[in-house]
Image (cartoon, helix red, strand yellow):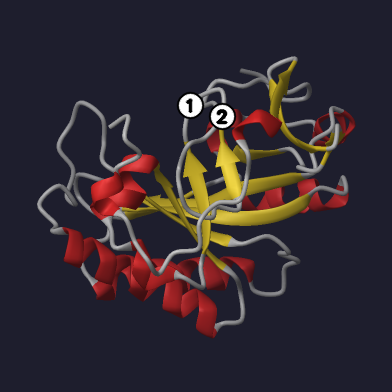
Amino acid sequence: EEKMYSEYHSDDMPESTLKTENFVRRNGYSFYTENGQVTSIAGIDISEFQGDIDWDMVKAAGIDFAMIRVGARTYGTGEIVMDNRFGENLEAADKAGIKTGVYFFSQAINAQEAEEEANIVLASIAEKKITYPIAFDMEYIENDTSRIDTLTKEEKTLVTAAFVNKIKEAGYRPMIYGNKEWLLKRIDISQFTTSSFWLLQDDEYPDYPYKYDMWQYTSSGSVVGIKG
């Protein structure tokens, strides 16, 4: 694992040009700097589990963008459950001057289910102002079995592509979420050279070798205006 998964090297993927020494952490926030100037912007991801949010306070705390959950497919029965705060979160974030993107937690086991998820997302954001990407968040469930556990790498890649292509066809920017292991071992990222990537890596700085657009550096951050 320390060797950057070099056996999973892909010639098709553009490599990350970010330098590890340029990552700075202050007050729990991580920043990317160039010549001493911060060149990154800070964002959060949000679902109904965050409850009532004071978005003006979030904006004042220096948050520039939010990735907001549209819904999820359950990992047991595979039914789709909408996030019951999606609409209000999207509207309130926008009103506070925070840029928004969205994500869907997928447990699709075939292309048809993935397209269904993409269509639900597209219907949910129709007429709304989305300037950030639409992210496909598929992951294994810790300490439990999930319906995607038996899918091969090829199958997960096909499922991801079905979602991504629907989003792209609709004129939005698709994004693929995953940790280093997921992106390098569980799907074939070389199929997604035109997609954006959202890397989850709970470390001082990321060492994922390829280009990524968003880095989630903690799952336990706290922001003024959001409880918990």
Q: Which percent across, then down, holds residue 184?
A: 32, 50
Q: Which residue is painted at 44% across and 71% down in the image? A: 164
Residue occupied by mark 1: 202
Q: Quadrant of the N terminus?
A: top left
Amino acid carrying label 2: it is Tyr
Residue 220 horizontal side relative to residue 30, left or right: left
Looking at the image, which is closer to me, 218 or 70? 218
Residue beneath label 2, please?
Answer: 205
Using the image, tell me which numbered label, if any, was put on residue 151. none
Q: Nearer the viewer, residue 174 or 204?
A: 204
- Say whether residue 184 is left or right of residue 222: left
In depth, the one of 228 and 41 nearer the eye is: 41
Local SS, label 1: loop
Assess disc 2: are there few (<14), some (14-19) or many (≥20) residues with their C-alpha within 10 Å of its C-alpha.
some
Real-space Cα distance between discs 2 and 1? 8 Å
> On the rendered image, what quadrant is the C terminus found in?
top right
Q: Which residue is at 74% across, 46% downward? A: 65
**Rendering coords of residue 225 (x, y %):** 78, 24
Task: Identify whether 77 is placed above or below 123.
Answer: above
The amino acid beneath tag 1 is Asp
